[in-house]
Structures are given as structure tokens and as C-alpha cells.
Amino acid sequence: MDAKPHWSPEADFSKGKFFIRRMDTAGYFKPAETPVARLPLVGFIYVASGEVLADVDGTPFLCQPGHFLMIPQEVPFAIRYYNDAVGYTGGYDPSFLPDAKLLRYISAPLHTAFWFDEGAFMSELFNMLANAYDRGDTTFIEKGVDLLLSRIKTNRPASIPAAVSTFLESVFDAEKMPGTIGGYAEEAGISSNYLSRLVKHCTGRSVGTWIDIVRIQRAKRLLSSTTLPIIDVSNSVGIEDQSYFSRLFKKQTGMTPSAFRKRMQG
């Protein structure tokens, strides 16, 4: 159980561009003292279950399941209580992202909610970000934060078409094998070409790129935590050609699967 606020005023975030920590508190927890912090980063809280009461510059925000709260840089805030809270907390330096993205910088707290399948998708995305952070995988972190911000729009009904949301939720579904462009297009009820154009327009990345991101992310997890032969890892992420898998893995990570495993398990 990690019930303490993750942003103590004494913590030094000056050298980090991004951090994320899992939040898991049993029962009701109210800090004996409620220190007010000012992060040099854009802070965030995502609640998968339970609730968290945060005070941002004197305004209370009750975060319940599916809720996401962003806190501007240097704005005073404090955690008033946790109640069976499970989720993620963290922060990022806006300069961490190479392009000027909507919501890269914020001047006021932003509190939004993700419901049902969208909430499951966000929970999996945060889980993958936390795993990538533990490994020091800055490439996936950059892409993951980019995707996170693309999902948070002030005008949510017009932010991302339903077909794109369906695709992203499906490709990040931990229970599904990464599929093909045709399969995702059929699931969304549109043509492959139209899905490709929509995804590229809304996220800045192609359908194939997102599929490869998820495949390599899952392959990293298997290489780090299992002794499966490389060919079985390749098959487990939907690539039958081991040579192609090895080339793709090296292109994405700069290392062969074997070298990556040796480094992570060494």
C-alpha cells in the first residue's frame, strides 16, 4: 500500500521530465498533515476505482472512478484524502513533448471523466506508461503521453471520431492479440483506407504504427518477465516471421530482442 501523497514539497523533480507511480490505498486515508506542493511539472491523477479529494489552489476536486485531473505547473495543491483509491499519479514537463500539442500547457486545473470502455482503455494506457517508466523506456513514454493528451479535449464530443476511439480501445486491449488494419476497420464498420486517414489525422500516427507500438511494448514485457523463446514471443504479439519481428524490434528499440532480454534480466 502506498498511501502517502506522491508529491511531497521536499521532493526534487528538477531533473525529471516525467514520472508516474501506482496508487493503491486500502480503506480511508487522510494525511495527518496536508502539505501544499507546487510541482515544476504538469501534475496528474487518474482514479481507476475508489476516490481521491484534491485541493487545487483552494478549489476542491473529487476524483472518482474514471476521473482524470490535470494540475498546472507551480499551482499549489494538496491531497485531502484517499478512499480505497487505485490508480496513478505523476507529472510531465511540457518540454518533454517535441511538438506543440493541445493541452501540452494548461493554465487552469482540468477535471474530466472517462466512462466504461474508454475508462478501461485509459487504465491500460496508464499501466503501460508505468511499466515503461519502470524500465526507463522514454520512447514509449513520449508516445503514450502524446496519446493521453490527444484523448483529453475540452470539446469532447468532437474530439475523436467513434471509429478512432474504437480502434484505439481495441488495439490497446490487453486481452486481444494485436490485429490487422483490415480487422480493425471491420470492427469499426468502415473501410481500411478511411480508418487509416481518420487515425492519422486525429493522432498523428498511422494505424500500422499504433499496432507496432503495442506489439513491441508487449514483446518488451514478455522478454523482461519470461523465458519464452524469441520465436514464441514473436508469435505471442501476432508476428509469425521471427526475422521480421527481430528487425522491427531493433528498429523500435535500437536493440535485438536477445540483447534487450539480456539487459533487462541481467
Image: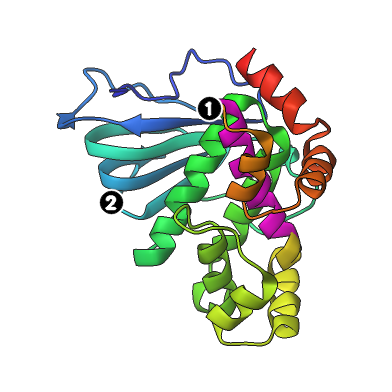
Q: Nearer the viewer, residue 256 or 154?
A: 256
Residue 109 seen anywhere in this rendered image of the structure: no
The residue identified by callout 2 is 64
Q: Is residue 254 left or right of residue 168?
A: right
Give 112 or 127, whichever is nearer the viewer. Answer: 127
- Report the front residue among 203 and 105: 203
Residue linked to disc 1: 225
> Dot 2: few (<14), some (14–19), or many (≥20) neighbours within 10 Å?
some
Residue occupying image coordinates x 28% and y 51%: 64
**Secondary structure found at label 2:** loop
Compared across the picture, whether 77 is left or right of 258 comes to left
Give the CA separation, mark 1 to mark 2: 32 Å
Please provide percent x and percent y for residue 171: 57, 61
Quick check: 34 above or below 71? above
Is residue 87 in view? Answer: yes
The residue range painted magenta reads 209-226
Instruction: Please say if 190 is above or below 120.
Output: below
On the rendered image, what quadrant is the N terminus found in? top left
Q: Position of residue 34 (x, y in %)?
A: 30, 23
Which residue is depicted at the point 43% across and 64% down? 118
Q: Quadrant of the C terminus?
A: top right
Secondary structure category for the residue under label 1: helix
Q: Amino acid at mark 1?
A: Ser
Residue 26: image quadrant is top left
Task: Name the residue: 27% across, 38% down.
Answer: 85
